[in-house]
Amino acid sequence: MTTAPVIEPDAAEAADRRQQPDLRPPKGAFSAGQLVKNLPDAVRKMAPAQLVRNPVMFIVEVGAALTTVLAIALPFLGQGREVGFTWAIAVWLWLTVLFATLAEAVAEGRGRAQAASLRATRTTTSANRVRAYDRAGDPDAQRAEFETVASADLAQGDVVVVVAGEVIPGDGDIVSGIASVDESAITGESAPVVREGGGDRSAVTGGTRVLSDRIVVAITSKPGETFVDRMIALVEGAVRQKTPNEIALSILLSTLTIVFLVVVLALGPIAGFQDAAPSIAVLVALLVCLIPTTIGALLSAIGIAGMDRLVQRNVLATSGRAVEAAGDVSTLLLDKTGTITYGNRRAVAFLALPGVAERRLVEAAALSSIADPTPEGASVVELAAAQGFAPTERAGRTVVPFTAQTRMSGIDEADGGALRKGAASSVLAWVREHGPVEPAVAAALDERVRGISEQGGTPLAVAERDADGTARLLGVIHLKDVVKTGLVERFAALRAMGIRTVMVTGDNPITARAIAEEAGVDDVLAEATPEDKLALIVREQEGGRLVAMTGDGTNDAPALAQADVGVAMNTGTSAAKEAGNMVDLDSDPTKLIDIVTIGKQLLITRGALTTFSIANDVAKYFAIIPAMFVGVFPGLQALNVMQLHSSSSAILSAVIFNALVIVALIPLALRGVRYRPSSAAALLSRNLLLYGVGGVIAPFIGIKVIDLVVGLIPGF
Amino acid sequence: MDALRFALTLLTLVIALVAIGWPLSTWMARTYTTDRDWLVERGVYRLLGVDARAQQRWPNYLRGVLAISVLGVLLLYGIQRLQAVLPLSLGLPAVPEGLAFNTAISFVTNTNWQSYSPELTLGYTAQLAGLAVQNFLSAAIGMAVAITLVRGIASRGGTGVIGNVWVDLVRTLSRILVPGALIAAVVLLATGVIQNLSGFQTVQTLTGGTATIPGGPVASQEAIKLLGTNGGGFFNANSAHPFENPTGLSNLFEIVLMLVIPFALARTFGLMVGDRRQGRAVLAAMITLYVLCTAAVTALEVGGAGSATVAAGGAMEGKEQRFGVLWSALFGSTSTLTSTGAVNSMHDSYTPLGGMVTMLDMMLGELAPGGVGSGLYGFLMIAILAVFLAGLMIGRTPQYLGKKIAGREITFVSLYVLTTPTVILAGLGLTFAIPGVTADVAKTSIWNPGPHGFSEVLYAFTSAANNNGSAFAGLTANTPWLNAALGAAMWLGRYLPIVFVLALAGSFASQDTHVEAGADTGGLVTHRPQFVALAVGTVLVVAALTYLPVLALGPLAEGLA
């Protein structure tokens, strides 16, 4: 037992040894090498006990086994003629199964690489646990007793002290203190961030390292359920549960499989009645070609890859359901500050009152802002400089800083003169202290102030006091919210997707509306309280809309929980992170738009490949049906529109095409189909054309090409 | 000249359908939504002891449908078996067990498959008290079930109730079918269809021989046979018989009767979901499929190859001289696309590929426009399937008119789509897999050798499972196996889908969230030509993929030879 925190040198070293994991795999990472690397996993996944969860591929495996047995038995049944053909079918059926498991293995493999680097951060560290923490009496735990425990033994509610150089042992909230923290292990961002107790930036994550100062942290996660744990489980796909749409699609795929099973089972006796009974290998080949193997093979890979794409953008979703919901969102709630505008306002104009030289106003504004460290103050100086005025130092000046009481800042000169800048009402009151203000001047000020407010700006009045003690108003500085560039286009794209954007701000309605107009959002919630936000979400939901929002503060938590997609900023509080169903590690609110896109892309990829899979069947019929029965009914040769070489080469070519198309589509499944924001009708037309009509045409070409090769093999 | 007359007939057909169907669709929407009961209806409710105001969940509704149907089968079976002691039986004996079983199911399921020659098997009591009653009831059940699905889609608030089965059935009868059939019977009488109770009359023919001419209450039977898309004829020759369908005018009117309710229901759907454009889209898809299929049969029959055909100016075998190829093809196509199954020409004698199209008409799932009620729900089920795929392809959780299509809903749709093909293919598979049965079918039932013989069996199972009732007449179906197997196919092909439709209706009705639909929220738009094309494509692809192999062994093998 120790009485003070001790930095273990090993721990610091261990922290150094941990390299910052790169969570973003190289773009378009898919190569033949990946296929080979994941082959062992793919083979393991072929075990029937595992495969049975995928009914479509399980049927293929059963068919492959049956055909193999047949191929072995045929010579003993005196049907040696068909041995070569049956073996070829059997091999390609096995390959079909392998390609399917390979697709899943590759998708999982990409996640596993990320998980491995994350796991490195989870190595057990020791923690300095405070015994009997006294929040009221000793918030900094200066006088408390400590015990060293392994981070894995920390329970929810424990309080620990972390000092510079140490690794934070678990997820928690800072109770006291301020520190700069290196969160690169989680976010990949190397610049340290500041975390401090009591505000909206109090949450810390286990596995990140304190670079300076000392903090007291209350642990909020159970062992094994920390942020990093969840992240690992997620990227590995260990907790992958089928999402509602995936379940619905699986049901449809199973149904199609049953229909075709019935078709093929009935075909045997029916054809037999007409002395046209096909061999079992041919029937199995027909079945495998008809059931939706393409989508059946790629379905789980699509889901894993979708999650993966989110993680690549540094967004962590608590469930696949949330990702899917993102695709359905039709209302986006966006905070004004930080999302739509840059965090701070900038000076854009000086408006002098009648009788005041413009030059004097510029000087006074700049001088009164010299000592103002805020970005707003700096922007006033910058604007003045742009108009040719550089403030000079003068001895005896005292700076009057801004306070919440005075709502003004400025300078006092040694000779008794003074300059003030601030809210119009405060500055007016200050001038009146030194003498009456003519009504005409007050009216002129009021007119300018109102004009700026109506344009969505913030007016700051500037006044001066001469050495003799008379004060006068000089004019108004126009501060303006600067809307981020490119937003108008993005919101237009969202509108095309049918998504309504609502800007949420604490500004007054006039200001809010002006900014909303400039940014191109559809609606605005001004003077918003957290309750207003919650009410807006409920109202939108009652109208049948799904709502997405971002938030970071504790008072955002109810709204985050109510929203269908609630993205908490990683810089936010634990409460916010708990309430939302996604966490953005980059704390970038505009990412909401990316999240919606990924959600949609996930669904579109599934839908497109299902359509493609079904459309493929048309061509396969034209290959296999004539091949099966042309011997008995020569007229069916008319259906052999591809002019395939022979019956056996036609059937084998269809099976080979069916297998190869899976491999060919793995990159698409991992990447997701291309999604460009557009209206639903345009999107549907495009995808129907590409994957529906394309799905009908592609196999005609593919099977023909394969047949040209297969036809060269002796015996076919 | 013939072409011009045909074109004018088509024009008349369209005018008649619009003139009757438009007000009828509004009337039907009001029938199923109003709170007011007629005096006679209140009397029936009191007699039945049901509370007309009580709303039912789907299992209760289903119990009502099944109770009426099982009772109907028992009643109809009893009447046939007791025929010898019933009045107005024309001295006909009791119907044999297997045939009575098959016939009872056939009429209760709205199939009206007839393994027998009616005028030689059933007396007037069995026709009027037995078959006609079921013609009305089975049609009413189809319409009631369709309306529950519409109500489910239109519902708000997640109450889970889909209507009251007794109210729906009674109103369908009292306000739509009975008055409709009454008017239709009068019109048919005016076109020359007979209506009497004079039994068999022996007359001297011109050549001096004698002929026995059957009479009967034909016009009244004929009206509901067509209006309710039943199809069971009073005579074996069905609508090819001059007493059932004497003239070109009666032929046209019978086509109108078959089409009017199924097409009108599409508009009723739009009215009931509060968006007429949706009804128009459904109607447009149905019409597109109807025109495509009818044009195909007509083209194949007119262009039928062979020297005899050329000499006759078309494939005239099995067709009535007074209707010719064009009016026969139109009637045959209408009858197979509406699940009626009435015939004015023998489909067995169509060209192989023309006959295949009549089969394909049924294989589409009887939805263009399909049977009364069953056509609408059949189409909506496929439309929902199309919505599901389309929804995914635009990156949204699929929803139709504000109702989410999630796991539960797609399960019911899948089972619906699965049922009919499975019944048909399993029936065929068993027929040709059980050695004793295969031998019996080959020896007794199949008239023609080769693929055509198989086509006759394929047609029989397709017709039975889709509740159409028409036949490739070369098949002798009155055998123990076919009576039993086709009876089972009719029963399963009717009631399993109804179970799934009601379950889906209930599932929709219990969804309390209503997803905002439409283009302004980036959702799928289901009233534009794009969706109509998608729905039509889905119908065609599903049918083609399911039935191409069996068609290849039957009509394709014969037609491409």
Image (cartoon, helix red, strand yellow):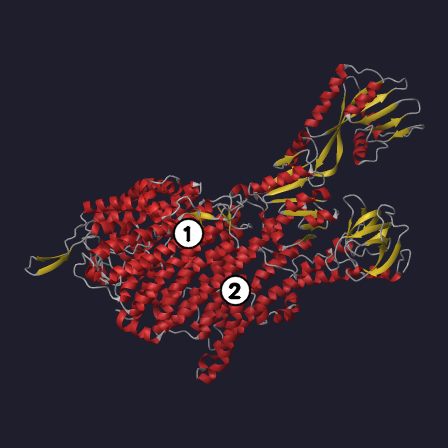
Q: Identify the element where label 1 is drawn.
A: helix
The vertical placement of B403 against B488, above or below, is: above
Image x and y of residue A678, in percent: 56, 45
Q: Element at badge 2?
A: helix
List x then y, in percent, for residue B346.
25, 59
**Above or below, B235 relative to B150:** below
Chain letter for mark 2: A
Asked where in the image residue A402 lies, by quadrant, the reply is top right
In front here: B100 or B236? B100
Tell me the subunit letter for badge 1. B
Mark 2 sits on what residue? A293
- The amino acid sitting under disc 1 is Tyr
Q: Residues within 10 Å of mark 1 (few under 14, many from 20)?
A: many
**Up-down relation of residue B405 to residue B473 (above or below):** above
The circle on residue B61 is: 1
Direction from residue A156 to residue B398 in the image, left or right? left
Labels in figure, total: 2
Q: Is residue B523 left or right of residue A420?
A: left
Q: Picture coordinates of residue A80 (x, y %)? A: 46, 82
Quadrant including the C terminus of chain B: bottom left
Determine if residue B369 is in view: no
Residue type at mark 2: give it: Thr
- Near-viewer residue (B323 or B315): B323
